[in-house]
Amino acid sequence: MLKRGKVFVNNTWNKVIYKIWSPIYDSIFKGLFFNVRKQIFNEISFKKEDKILFVGVGTGADIELIDHDNLDITAIDFSPDMLNKARAKFNISSVNFLEMDAQDMNFKNESFDYVFAHLVLSVVPNADKCFQEMVRVLKPEGKIIIFDKFAPKNKQLSLPKKLLRPIIGILGTDIGLNFEKIYYRNNQKLKIEEDVPAMLNGMYRKIIIRKI
Ligand SMILES: C[S@@+](CC[C@H](N)C(=O)[O-])C[C@H]1O[C@@H](n2cnc3c(N)ncnc32)[C@H](O)[C@@H]1O
């Protein structure tokens, strides 16, 4: 269970919240994050044989930006409503959409070359478990690409963020998650290749991690 400020969130709550978000998610958020997503995918050259996993794929805004018909893509989400939105976009393509909990994935160890976690660590009830699962299913030399908002490094959350955190938490995401704590608890066999500000003065970051 994730504690967002003073608010506790679990899978059941997230399912309800993302059912509500699903019809309006793209109209609110697709444009907002478009440039960052585009930049992330511009910098990656997928090989045809790469196995790619999208964790908490949502409405599939990432998949729209890549050559999905010619790639081996698996995409999981816990919300059937968000998944249905994604499925409707790609129903004739070969994307394998699965309803699955990112904290307890039903994949063998070392299955994927790329694991994308865009705006999901800040949403799942237990970000540690989700991160551990991403590492487990990643092949050696594979990459985890994270795009998400985190608490500032080596700094307290500002007072406005502290006050807003529980309210935004109820709406389905955490603005106070500390990435460094998650990483250093689980960083065996990992190397951070890139950790750069992506949006809003570094509140959103792009982080690329390689499994060594
Ligand atoms: C903020 S949305 C991000 C969606 C997408 N990755 C994007 O970049 O637009 C968070 C997504 O995480 C999903 N999610 C929440 N808890 C989850 C869990 N335990 N396992 C898998 N997905 C989950 C939600 O249903 C939602 O689709």
Image (cartoon, rainbow, N blue to C red):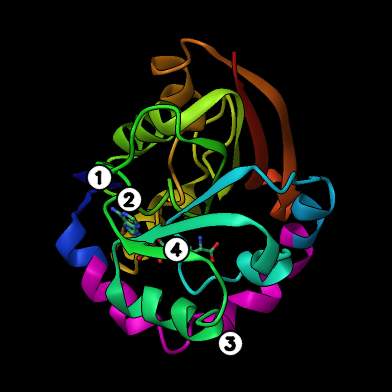
SS at badge 1: strand
Determine which residue is flagged by label 4.
Answer: 96
Task: Indicate which disc residue 154 carries.
Answer: none
Q: Which residue sits at x=66%, y=33%?
A: 208
> Percent x, y for residue 206?
68, 42
Q: Is residue 62 above or below residue 160?
A: below
Q: Amino acid at mark 1?
A: Leu
Q: Earlier in the sequence, mark 4 or mark 2?
A: 4
The CA span between labels 4 and 1 is: 28 Å
In this rendering, which labeled residue sits more in front, label 1 or label 3?
A: 3
In this rendering, which labeled residue sits more in front, label 4 or label 3?
A: 4
Q: Amino acid at mark 4?
A: Asn
Determine which residue is flagged by label 1.
Answer: 2
The CA span between labels 4 and 3 is: 24 Å
Span shown in magenta: 15-37
Main SS class of the magenta portion in the image: helix
Task: Indicate which disc residue 124 carries.
Answer: 2
Front-most of 69 and 211? Answer: 69
SS at badge 3: helix
* Labels 1 & 2 near each other (Cβ < 8 A): yes
Determine which residue is flagged by label 3.
Answer: 27
